[in-house]
Amino acid sequence: MRISIITTSRAEYGHLYWLIRTIAEHPDCALDLVVAGAHQSPEFGHTIREIQKDGFPIGACLSALPETDTRADMAHFSGQLIQELTTHWQTCRPDWVVVIADRYEMLAPAVAATCLGLPIAHIEGGDVSGGALDDHVRNALSKLAHLHFAPSQRCAQRLLAMGEAPWRVHHVGALSLERLVREALPSMEALEATLGFQLPERFLLAAMHPVTLADDVTADFDALLAALAQRPEPVIFCYPNADCGHRYIREKIVMLCRNHPERYRAVVNLPHLHFIKLMDKATALIGNSSAGIMESPTVGVACLNVGDRQLGRETSDNTLTVPATPEAILEGIEIITSIDFQRRARRCTNPYAPPAGQGYSSERIVQTLLTTPIDLRLLRKFP
């Protein structure tokens, strides 16, 4: 069985790693790994090298990101990717197309697969992020998909409420957590060697992305900077993802680090496990990244979720959500850095953990793909 997986960014590749590896090593599977988007951009760390280093064969290397970051660029890029995927799959037709989560880039493979009559499996459907374009994309992907691998029980129930047949919906947990179970985190020495600097004893880790449904997509980031300017802790920034407005955020981070190197540092890109290790060493994670929702509870680090980008998502007891104003962010930092909240974060449970007794999420997904008949009942999506 030929299974095509599309990856366009550093974050989703970290989530997909064990699924890609499981497919690549399974005797009944042939991997078609399609790499595009930010992976080929030096601006985002040229992360295709990480995929090559992991030894996975790349079936197709398609469009890189445009040089600018407007909404029109997002649409043009998606259109170009649809054309390239269509050409690729006409010559290398897969049995399944696997898409993940809610990035706008995932619309391209879903549209191309739909037009070509290819069955789609969607990972992490049924979730909610009401303040971002991601929410629209995720729901669109779910309605185009033929099988669903939900990250939580509530997400699975939401897919059923959207009209998806129960036999199509499988609760498997968040794929990103599998790496924390199956692999050891790097040592502190290895992390600092990759970072190129020594970590302070206490620091805040900031991961803030553009809010793509807001009139001003970077206003929340400005509010975060205003709050951090009034705090004493060192701050390490992670670069934003490739949404419209990301260059403004990147330029602000570069300027801060240049003007105040004793206080601010930045990370362009880290391998997934190195990022988890960095999160583990932080006093708290601050921003609007999904890592604060899905992965930080398992790590046990306090998280301040800022603004509406993740509006409506399930959160654990380690997470406090505040409005995107400097005053609210400052108050939130006071709370999550307190001794009581730090203890609470270390004791929390993760709603995105896989169901007990199911084994590894990636293995369950592959087994489901192998055993689901590809027939009219699957493709028609009619009750």
Image: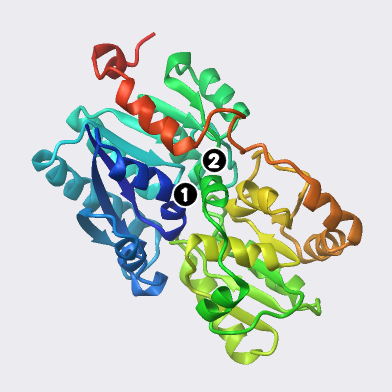
Question: Could you tell me which quadrant the C terminus lies in?
Answer: top left
Q: CA distance from mark 1 to mark 2?
A: 8 Å
View extreme (top): residue: 383
Q: Which residue is mark 2?
A: 174
Question: Looking at the image, is mark 1 or mark 2 earlier in the sequence?
Answer: 1
Among the 4 quarters of the image, the one containing residue 55: bottom left
Q: Looking at the image, do the residues carrying marks 1 and 2 touch, with CB atoms under 8 Å apart?
A: yes
Among the 4 quarters of the image, the one containing residue 379: top left
Label at residue 271: none
Q: Is residue 139 visible?
A: yes
Q: Is residue 208 visible?
A: no
Question: Could you tell me which quadrant the N terminus lies in?
Answer: top left
Compared with 63, 383 (above or below) is above
Q: Which residue is mark 1?
A: 15
Three-letter code for the amino acid on which mark 1 is drawn: His
Q: Which residue is drawn at the image coordinates 32% and 59% (left, top)?
A: 37
Among the 4 quarters of the image, the one containing residue 207: bottom right
Q: Secondary structure at mark 2?
A: loop
Q: Which residue is drawn at the image coordinates 83% and 57% (left, top)?
A: 342
Across and down, in percent, residue 69 comes to: 39, 65
Left/right placement of residue 157 relative to residue 203 reads left
Left/right placement of residue 58 relative to residue 350 reads left
Q: Which residue is drawn at the image coordinates 41% and 70% (left, top)?
A: 44
Residue sitting nearer the eye, 45 or 201? 201
Three-letter code for the amino acid on which mark 2 is drawn: Ala
Across and down, in percent, residue 140 comes to: 41, 33
Across and down, in percent, residue 268 comes to: 49, 73
Q: Mark 2 Cα within 10 Å, few/some/many (few <14, many 20+)?
A: many
Q: Which residue is drawn at the image coordinates 26% and 49% (left, top)?
A: 33
Q: Secondary structure at mark 1?
A: helix
The way the protein has been coloured in the rendering is: rainbow
